[in-house]
Each structure stands twice: as C-alpha cells, then as structure tokens.
Amino acid sequence: MADLDLEKLKLLFEYTKFHIGLYATLIGVCMALAKFGHKVDAVVLNKARFWLGFTAVCFLGAGAAGGAIASNIADRTPDEFFSKPLSIFGACTLTYNWWEHIEHGFFWVGVLVSVGYFIFQPKEQPPAGVSVQKPAAESTS
C-alpha cells in the first residue's frame, strides 16, 4: 500500500509540474496578445487588455497554488501530504484539497473570463451624432 501511495505522489508531482508549465505558457500568450494583438484588430484587443490582464492574474494564482502543492510533495509522506496543512515559506497554510480547489478555480475563472469576453464582446457602436449608412444593394439589370 505504501508503494501505491508513493506512486500517487509521483504522478501528482508530474501532473502539477505540467499544470505550472501550462499556466506559464498561457500567461505568455495573454501578454503577447495584449502587446502585439493590436496589429490584428486594434479595436477589439485594445478593449480586451483589461480582461487579458485579469486572465493572466488568474493563471498566476493557479500557478502559485500549483507551486504550493508541488513544493510540499518531496518533504512529506503520503499520509502527511494528504491530511496535514501544506507549508509555504515555513508557515502552515491550507490542506492539499484546498490548494487543489484554489488552483483549478483560478484556472477555470481565467479561461471563462477570457473566452467569455471574446464570445460576448460588445459590438462596436458609432460615436454619438454619426449616422452609419449601409451600402445600397447593387442591382443586376
């Protein structure tokens, strides 16, 4: 049974390392879009900078929670890891289950906010006092 628990910790460590790398990559994507995306569609991405920043902060929070999990795996037995609070900079904080929920919560909030913004972004309105005329349909005669 101890070997099985040790194997679970090894898999959890690999899983958490993958997640931290994914979050770092997604933060880089958000930063690249905020910096260089204006060359694609200036109006849309200039307005999206706030939401891209918010998403990057969510991914940063997810990575920090993943770091809290990963940094405690090597120092503990499987029983200690899953039952006792994890320590961060020497201070006892929350249990693994809490950190897991924080990590995934931050990630999914970041995903939903960024995807939601681009799906439901407000339509461009013309400035006040400017009328927009649609082009007349061409007749084929």
Image (spheres, grey):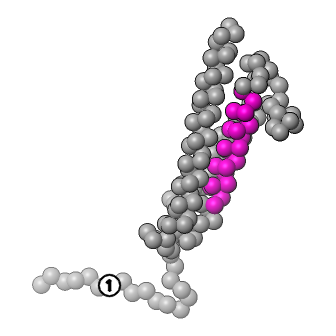
Res 140 visible: yes
Q: Position of residue 81 (x, y in %)?
A: 76, 24
**Which residue is pictured at 56% across the width and 57% down the height?**
30
* Span highlighted in magenta in the image: 53-73
| Residue placed under numbered mark 1 in the picture | 135
Is 6 located above or below residue 14 in the figure?
Answer: above
Left or right of 72 on screen, residue 125: left
Indicate the secondary structure of the residue bearing disc 1.
Answer: loop
Q: How many marks?
A: 1
In this view, 90 is above or below 79: below
**Does the magenta-highlighted stretch encompass residue 23?**
no
Identify whether 82 is placed above or below 24: above
Q: Residue at x 67, y 54 (%)?
A: 57
Q: Amino acid at mark 1?
A: Pro
Name the dominant secondary structure of the magenta segment.
helix
Q: Nearer the viewer, residue 97 or 56?
A: 56
The residue sitting at the right extreme is 91
- Residue at (63, 65) in percent of width and height: 50
Q: Percent x, y for residue 42?
A: 49, 73
